[in-house]
């Protein structure tokens, strides 16, 4: 992504030293100032070969290679420059290049140096809070299939989106354009191809109408009806630029524009009022309802180099005032290429959040006016290179991401995505312990149930008493834990978008259920006028089975009770059915039928003597089962 002009000139001017160091570097510095990095590298290299290089030249070589994503050379020259420099930002970029080259341990060493020097920086804070983040991202598992598109060229292609069956993207393949010195590729244009029913793409053509000019055009997004396009373009088109008096270089910024569809052409191009000659506003993305415009900008008041903003799209088409998405989303680094999914997720690329390489794709969601925690999209959406311009059709599970990763056809390529699993998931760590001692219980069986009570998965706890489950975000689940000699227990885990949730389940020794001549389970309630065993009742009855297995001479009498609704005879019959159902459940678990009997008590012995004025809660308390020990058990040992 570093090989096309999306970076704002102001940021480059502030972060790089472009004033000629001396007469020997003058030619190279002039190329550098004009963003002609390929030529600048060649001139600086000549100084190295002559033995005339110094820390300044090494820094310029590192920065020039960084900007065209030559990670190997950038790493080399950053290391050399840092022999005589302690620049925190240079150390950060060096760590990024190491990471991009797969040197994760060395990258973390440099991030530790950076964090010591800039402890308050968001990037440092995130790293110190989670220094072992890389394995967690890599071990998430692939949630997508990914495939390089045949439509890619040897030049830069990126930002693929669909408007109906038409596939739009940005490309530097137009050889009729003049070459851009940054990377020796033609200026960027918007292209369109037809996506056929067999999944192939027709040959791409320049988008018709007035979108493309001799200047750079960037990514495009469409209104829900497909008849309005928003896109980026250099401010040169409007005659807005600044001229450097030393290098004579003209500097533009990026602006956003809107066009309307006229047949197959795009006409009526107009600039958006959020544009400014003093900063960039770029890479627009319209929400699925057409009411919100997202974009990135380096306007004053942000948190970093580029931030993600949103603005309302009013009924008359005017754009409201920009609102920064806040510090959960934006860092001291670059946040770019927003995309608003139809399910409410906001995707963007960032080099400030913890990732695998340079720019990684991240996502979040606005909940009750606040942004949810930012999450890394993981592999294969992300790589150790630049990954950006994510797009997804949530209905089909198909979309695109752009990347300059190894193995592509050009400097930037568009990759097709096919979603295999839910994007957002939560790692639940369940720890099972002895309720009395707090010691972890190895070998306890845990079972995960969804919010409808369906069994999803089971696994035993490890030596530390831990079992882990991966569940979809915002889904309530229940985890049940059982173990011989212990009373079963369960814990509810509320749905969340946090990446990890921890829960501790305490198991009481099973003898504690035996009180005098009874086994005291949590009340086994029946639904009104019903006698079937529910999942909640089964959970409690399994405890009775455990106790009877431990004490093979124990004999139980189960009594079943009803509420006062209905006639006496009907309630006796109903309670008898409930008692027999209870007995049958226990017998089905392997208990000898001679060891358990059941009797229906009807409404004779209410738990709450409320007569004809019972509340629904009091009625439920009265329809219950109780378990009396008639012989055997610990008292007989």
Image (cartoon, rainbow, N blue to C red):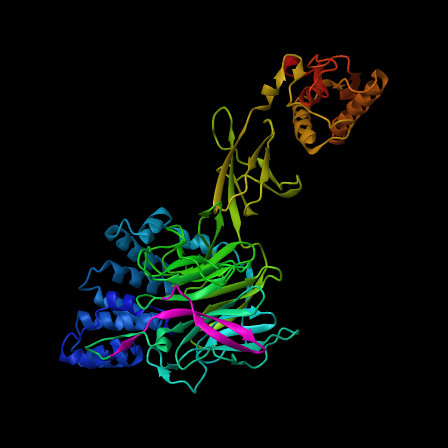
Relative vertical location of residue 280 with respect to residue 127 in this rendering, above or below:
below
Report if residue 262 lies within the magenta region: yes
Q: Nearer the viewer, residue 539 or 508?
A: 539
- Placement of 359 over or under 623, stated as above or below: below
Q: In the orientation shown, which residue stands out farthest toward the left? A: 22
Q: Residue furthest front?
A: 316
Quadrant for the N terminus in the image: bottom left
Residue 207 percent location from the top left of the image:
51, 79
Q: Is residue 483 visible?
A: yes
Residue drawn at x 63%, y 73% is 199
Q: In this rendering, is residue 589 above or below 625?
A: below
Q: Quadrant of residue 79?
A: bottom left
Front residue of 368/263: it is: 263
Q: Give the dominant element type of the magenta stretch: helix, strand or loop.
A: strand
**Residue 304 lies within the magenta run:** no
- Residue, far right: 569
For the question of whether residue 592 can be seen, the reply is no
Question: In the picture, which quadrant includes the C terminus?
Answer: top right
The residue that appears at 28% across and 52% down in the rendered structure is: 115
Residue at image position (57%, 54%) is 422
Quadrant of res 91: bottom left
Q: How many marks?
A: 0
Horizontal and vertical percent position of residue 520: 64, 19
Left or right: where 413 falls relative to 579:
left
Measured as percent of width and height from the top left, residue 631 is found at 71, 14
- First to last magenta residue range: 249-275
Residue 467: image location, x then y, percent: 53, 41
**Left or right: where does residue 149 sit relative to residue 213?**
right
In the figure, is residue 600 to the left or right of 523?
A: right
The one nearer the camera, 409 or 79, is 409
In the picture provided, is 449 more to the left or to the right than 595?
A: left
């Amino acid at each position: 992504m570093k090989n096309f002009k999306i970076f704002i000139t102001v940021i480059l001017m502030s972060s790089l030293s472009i004033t000629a160091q001396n007469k020997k570097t003058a030619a190279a510095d002039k190329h550098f100032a004009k963003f002609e990095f390929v030529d600048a590298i060649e001139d600086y290299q000549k100084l190295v070969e002559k033995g005339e290089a110094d820390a300044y030249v090494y820094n310029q070589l590192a920065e020039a290679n960084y900007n065209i994503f030559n990670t190997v050379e950038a790493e080399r020259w950053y290391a050399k420059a840092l022999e005589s420099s302690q620049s925190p930002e240079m150390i950060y970029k060096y760590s990024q290049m190491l990471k991009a080259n797969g040197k994760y341990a060395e990258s973390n060493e440099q991030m530790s140096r950076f964090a010591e020097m800039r402890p308050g920086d968001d990037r440092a804070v995130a790293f110190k809070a989670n220094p072992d983040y890389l394995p967690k991202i890599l071990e998430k598992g692939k949630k997508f299939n990914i495939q390089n598109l045949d439509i890619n060229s040897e030049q830069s292609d990126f930002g693929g989106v669909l408007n109906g069956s038409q596939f739009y993207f940005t490309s530097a393949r137009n050889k009729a354009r003049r070459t851009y010195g940054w990377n020796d590729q033609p200026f960027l244009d918007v292209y369109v191809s037809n996506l056929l029913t067999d999944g192939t793409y027709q040959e791409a053509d320049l988008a018709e109408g007035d979108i493309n000019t001799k200047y750079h055009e960037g990514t495009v997004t469409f209104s829900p009806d497909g008849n309005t396009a928003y896109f980026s373009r250099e401010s040169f088109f409007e005659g807005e630029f600044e001229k450097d008096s030393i290098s004579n270089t003209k500097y533009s910024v990026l602006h956003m524009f809107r066009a309307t569809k006229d047949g197959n052409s795009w006409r009526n191009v107009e600039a958006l009022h959020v544009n400014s000659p003093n900063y960039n506003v770029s890479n627009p993305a319209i929400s699925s309802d057409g009411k919100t415009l997202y974009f990135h900008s380096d306007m004053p008041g942000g948190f970093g180099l580029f931030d993600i903003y949103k603005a309302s799209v009013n009924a008359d088409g005017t754009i409201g005032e920009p609102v920064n998405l806040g510090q959960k989303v934006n860092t001291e680094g670059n946040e770019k290429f927003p995309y608003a999914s139809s399910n409410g997720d906001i995707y963007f690329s960032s080099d400030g959040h913890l990732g695998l390489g340079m720019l990684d794709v991240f996502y979040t969601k606005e909940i009750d006016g606040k942004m949810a925690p930012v999450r890394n999209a993981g592999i294969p959406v992300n790589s150790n290179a630049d990954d950006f311009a994510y797009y997804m059709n949530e209905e089909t599970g198909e979309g695109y991401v752009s990347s300059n990763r190894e193995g592509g056809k050009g400097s930037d390529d568009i990759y097709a995505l096919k979603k295999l699993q839910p994007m957002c998931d939560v790692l639940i760590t369940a720890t099972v312990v002895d309720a009395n001692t707090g010691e972890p219980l190895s070998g306890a069986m845990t079972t995960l149930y969804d919010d409808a009570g369906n069994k999803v998965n089971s696994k035993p706890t490890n030596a530390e008493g831990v079992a882990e489950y991966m569940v979809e975000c915002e889904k309530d689940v229940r985890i049940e834990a059982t173990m011989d000699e212990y009373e079963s227990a369960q814990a509810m885990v509320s749905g969340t978008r946090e990446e990890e949730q921890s829960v501790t389940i305490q198991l009481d020794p099973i003898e504690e259920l035996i009180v005098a001549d009874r086994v005291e389970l949590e009340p086994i309630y029946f639904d009104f006028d019903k006698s079937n065993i529910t999942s909640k009742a089964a959970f409690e009855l399994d405890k009775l089975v455990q106790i009877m297995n431990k004490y093979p001479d124990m004999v139980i009498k189960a009594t079943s009770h009803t509420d006062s609704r209905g006639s006496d005879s009907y309630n006796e019959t109903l309670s008898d059915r409930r008692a027999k159902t209870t007995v049958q459940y226990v017998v089905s678990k392997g208990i000898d039928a001679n060891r358990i009997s059941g009797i229906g008590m009807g409404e004779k012995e209410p738990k709450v003597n409320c007569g004809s004025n019972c509340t629904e809660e009091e009625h439920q308390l009265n329809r219950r089962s109780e378990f009396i020990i008639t012989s055997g058990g610990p008292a007989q040992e």
